């Protein structure tokens, strides 16, 4: 990953670096129980938690193991969600994709547009070979979205993650560069 944070533009969106000045935007949607239902964390209770999340976004970029773009609608500078890579394994040329979006922007094609830009960047600029996603089985909307943009379901990882005192089974999906290039 490069030193300068890349800005991605789509038809309706600008994907940019998230800064501390965005903490109230981040807190707004990461404190929403519906947004956080499948996030793997409890809804945020303070803006300090949003600042910690932003700090984590910066640390994964600086340590070259991930990147998280803030999603804004063109013409505004309000962060309405985020999307990006984590657990980038350069030796194996694979990374995980993760994302979330403020509830009032659901079902408008925004995350699909953001994901398509991020996936394109991953395959072409970072030359990632395999992008994978781990999704709770009950998160039907996310599973549907990933399949729409080109991911294939590989299987179930039993009790893979512990969240809120319970173990969750996760669906493993992948998108390979050879399939993207077809």
Image (tube, rainbow, N blue to C red):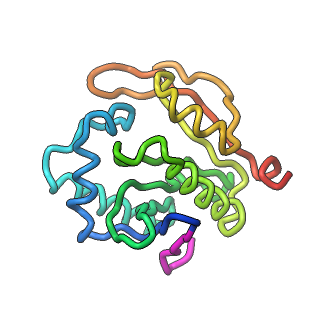
- Where is the N terminus found, in terms of image quarters? bottom right
In the displayed structure, would residue 136 be above or below residue 112? above
In the displayed structure, would residue 22 be above or below residue 116? below
Q: Residue 89 placed where, x, y %?
A: 60, 54
**Which residue is more in the foreground, 65 or 18?**
18
Q: Residue 87 placed where, x, y %?
A: 52, 51
Q: Is residue 139 left or right of residue 1?
A: left
Q: Residue 25 placed where, x, y %?
A: 26, 59
Residue placed furthest toward the right: 182
Q: Is residue 58 left or right of residue 142?
A: left
Judged by its main secondary structure, the magenta piece is loop
Residue at the image position 50 percent from the left and 60 percent from the top: 65
Residue at the image position 42 percent from the left and 55 percent from the top: 82
Residue 142 highlighted magenta (yes or no): no
Residue 19 falls in image quadrant:
bottom left
Q: Residue 22 placed where, x, y %?
A: 27, 66
Residue at the image position 35 percent from the left and 48 percent from the top: 102
Q: How many marks?
A: 0
Q: Which residues are magenta?
A: 1-9
Residue 3 highlighted magenta (yes or no): yes
């Amino acid at each position: 990953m490069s030193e300068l944070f890349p800005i991605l533009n789509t038809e309706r969106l600008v994907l940019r670096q998230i800064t501390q000045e965005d903490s109230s935007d981040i807190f707004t949607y990461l404190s929403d129980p519906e947004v956080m239902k499948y996030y793997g964390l409890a809804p945020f209770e303070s803006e300090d938690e949003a600042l910690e999340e932003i700090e984590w976004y910066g640390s994964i970029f600086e340590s070259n193991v991930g990147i998280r773009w803030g999603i804004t609608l063109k013409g505004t500078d309000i962060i309405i969600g985020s999307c990006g890579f984590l657990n980038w394994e350069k030796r194996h040329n694979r990374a995980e994709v993760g994302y979330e979006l403020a509830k009032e922007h659901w079902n408008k094609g925004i995350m699909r547009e953001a994901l398509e830009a991020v996936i394109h960047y991953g395959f072409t600029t970072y030359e990632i070979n395999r992008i994978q996603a781990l999704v709770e089985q009950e998160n039907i909307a996310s599973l549907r979205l990933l399949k729409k943009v080109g991911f294939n379901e590989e299987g179930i990882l039993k009790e893979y993650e512990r969240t809120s005192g319970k173990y969750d089974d996760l669906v493993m999906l992948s998108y390979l560069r050879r399939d993207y290039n077809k």
